[in-house]
Amino acid sequence: MMSQMPQLSACPSCEEPLESGDRFCGACGYDLSAAPAPPDDHPTLTMNGAGSLPPEEATDVTWPVVPQPEGAETAPTVHLPTDLAGTDSGGTPLPSNLLPSNSPLPPTGSPVSPATGVRFDRPPEPDEYPLQAPDPRVAAELPTPAEGTKVCVACRSGRVDPDGYCENCGHAQPRERDHMEQESGPLAAVSDRGLRHHRNEDAFAVGQCALPDGAPALVAVVCDGVSSATRPDAASLAASQKAGESLLAALPQGTHPQQAMHDAIIAASHAVNSLAEEPATAREHAPHQNAPACTLVASVVTPALLVIGWVGDSRAYWIPVDRSSPPARLTEDDSWAAQMVAAGLMSEAEAYADERAHAITGWLGADAYELEPHTASFKPDRPGVVVVCTDGLWNYAESAEEMAEVVPPDAMVRPLHSAQVLVGHALDGGGHDNVTVAVVPFPAPPQGAVIG
């Protein structure tokens, strides 16, 4: 019995069209009975397997897997739509409720300010990778760097090149703003990147000057860059520097501290706004991002008066030396949570537990709907310290009572140590945000007085 002939439409040798029943090619004489039979099964190639389909054959088609010769390149992988996170037309990751549950990338909300005037300022940050431990075998072979040479923080032996990389192990070195400390007479400030952010977007300015009557005045400014905006680190730095310069220039001229505070916030706002006045080409790679923006809180302390100014959700606290006296929070947040509490719609605990709590309703920046500087004056009847900080700290000590518990008892005479302790408290709590705090004693001690 003759075996069944394979049904071919063209000659395997010369590709001449064939008719049903042909046993030999009419063009070249090829014996069609010698043609190999097609495989019995036809595995279906899924869209996440190897290979891709031509556009005209991409629907309702099963595709046989053809064995690849050894050493041949495999076809590129075709991803399912759910394999990659989606983005909107501006390139912004879609909100989490629009992302598939099996997306390999973390869901992220759009940072763009909605028309309600609320800005959401908490995009997720990637985990930091710890520095590689130094190899003692390599370190032992390296000569001790000359005195004054910047040494790598990872291997502790290699010299850091001008580009900021270790010549021994290749590690990029921490940036200058990752951790900053400054002491200015009787006041001090500390800022730290935290444990989760890839850079420090906070900034501060501290200083002291003399009033026209010779009385001392202490100035502290703390700013928190809005992470959902472009260049938040530049915004906070510009605002803190400008506000500090404005206060230290106005106070010696006799300007009332509360008026000087108002003017300083306006000056800081102009400084941040100017960052948005850049060539169109400067933002062509991120056209969907907002203008640079930040929050601000500042204090002026004199021998008899305490003045606070702020925009946003950075805060100031009053902590008396006598802890039997009540502490106080001196600012009210420009935030969604504060609006809910003020309207009587939620308790403070409920509002700040909500995921929308940190949506700010006031900030410095070119896209702020209306700048409303807040200022307030106080005359404390006893000595204490003013804690001026970003939410990277107060998230871990929210109420005035909680803040008083973590402020060291000797904060008035050891402001730098106290600021370090407070930053450490935030880092011990998780360090999910940049942390910045200034500690300012009240009343301002006479200039030249010995502290500690």
Image (cartoon, grey):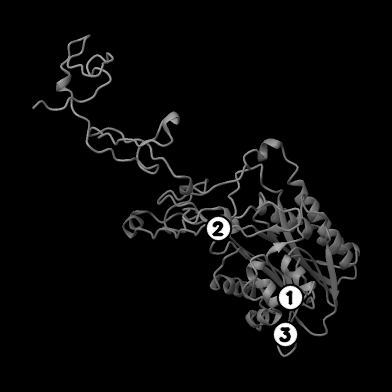
Q: Nearer the viewer, residue 336 or 213?
A: 336
x and y, in percent, of residue 414 in the image: 66, 77
Residue at mark 1: 317
Which of the labelled discs sits on residue 125, or is there none? 2
x and y, in percent, of residue 25 in the image: 20, 13
Question: Marks 3 and 1: which is nearer the front?
Answer: 1
x and y, in percent, of residue 287 in the image: 66, 42
Q: Nearer the viewer, residue 311 or 187?
A: 311
Residue at mark 3: 321
Relative side of 140 to 347, left or right: left
Element carrying mark 1: strand
Q: Identify which amino acid the numbered label 2 is placed on.
A: Glu
Element carrying mark 3: loop
In space, the residues marked 3 and 2 are separated at their CA atoms by 38 Å
Q: Identify which amino acid the numbered label 1 is placed on.
A: Tyr
Work out whether 447 lies above or below 130.
Answer: below
Identify the image quadrant of residue 374: bottom right
- Structural crowding at the residue carrying mark 1, measured as other residues with C-alpha within 10 Å and reported as few (<14), some (14–19) or many (≥20): many
